[in-house]
Image: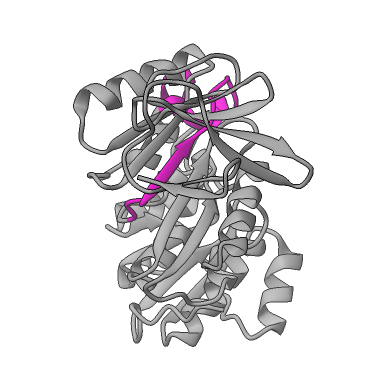
Amino acid sequence: MIEVSSFSGVPVGVLGLGKSGFVAAQALARGGAEVMAWDDDLKKRDAAAEAGVTIVDLRSADLAVMPSLVLSPGIPHSHPAPHPVVARAREAGAEIIGDIELLARTQRDAAYIGITGTNGKSTTTALIGHILALAGREVAVGGNLGTPALSLAPLGAGGAYVLEMSSYQLELTFSLEFDIAVLLNITPDHLDRHGGMDGYIAAKQRIFRGQKAPQAAIVGVDDAICAGIEHDLAQAAEQIVIPISAERAVARGVYAAGGRLIDDSKGGPPCRYRHRGDRLRPSLLPGPGAPPGTHRDNRRGSVRQ
């Protein structure tokens, strides 16, 4: 578990004692914060209290003493109506944040990879974590996937957090700028929690907040909404933008075609990856010359510049 020491000696509210909220309360307490935790569910309050978490009824407590309220992502903070404790905290001037924000403020030296989308984000998150681990990187995988972010191991420079980010979590995360941010797709979902489709889209787009090159935005373009987001990001030219598709070729992107994964993200003759058994083996598509840099041609066992 990560100790959140940035609130040492400071009263901090925690609303919601499910998986992520319970771990957040423990992480804050271990870091020296004066935790004021609450859940509307008596069983969750009792379980947290038995584990040593300080329970305070935030519905009636003086919230002016706490600068921050850590909110579990499943609890509404705006639509269809904010939870009464959230409304009270806002009136008292407290910031409303989530556990991912606590992770970002605590583990500043690690790299961050965030994955969101309506569908497929859990599988993609797990796969990216698996690939990085096989490549020898120090990696921790969590977030909306089911493993609370603050239960992960502390990582320093060279380590990477791979986080599945729900729209709820993105709305509660403010300081984190993802080194790599992935948006897979957007279709209508959770519209009551976001005040409609525009609010849902805006929440998903927050994964790209603050990015600057060489940070990268990877955007699925197989639905019209995400295709528009990719276009706008590319036009703004603030970060590296890589479109991806499972349905068609995309210029300067990565796409699937004929059972192969084709990487055209650098332009020029693209690299393709053919699945053979349990390995993806790269080869060069026919064309004049090869991509710049050093490449190992697996068909010939030679190195080419």
Magenta stretch holds residue 216: no
58 versus 244 height, above or below: below
Query: Would you say residue 56 is visible in this rendering?
Result: no
Say which residue appears at 32% left-offset and 51% top-offset: 177
Q: Nearer the viewer, residue 275 or 118?
A: 275
Colour mapping: one colour
Magenta stretch holds residue 193: yes
Which contiguous range is marked in magenta?
A: 176-201
Query: Would you say residue 242 is visible in this rendering?
Result: yes
- The N terminus sits in image quarter: bottom right
Say which residue appears at 58% left-offset and 20% top-offset: 188
Q: Nearer the viewer, residue 121 or 31?
A: 121
Query: Can you give x and y, in whole percent of width and height, for residue 236 in the image?
Result: 20, 27
Say which residue appears at 59% left-offset and 15% top-offset: 247
Question: With 236 as the anchor, is 254 left or right in this view?
Answer: right
Question: With 283 as the anchor, is 34 left or right in this view?
Answer: left
267 versus 210 height, above or below: above
Q: Nearer the viewer, residue 290 or 26?
A: 290
Query: Can you give x and y, in whole percent of width and height, for residue 173 in the image?
Result: 39, 52
- The C terminus sits in image quarter: top left
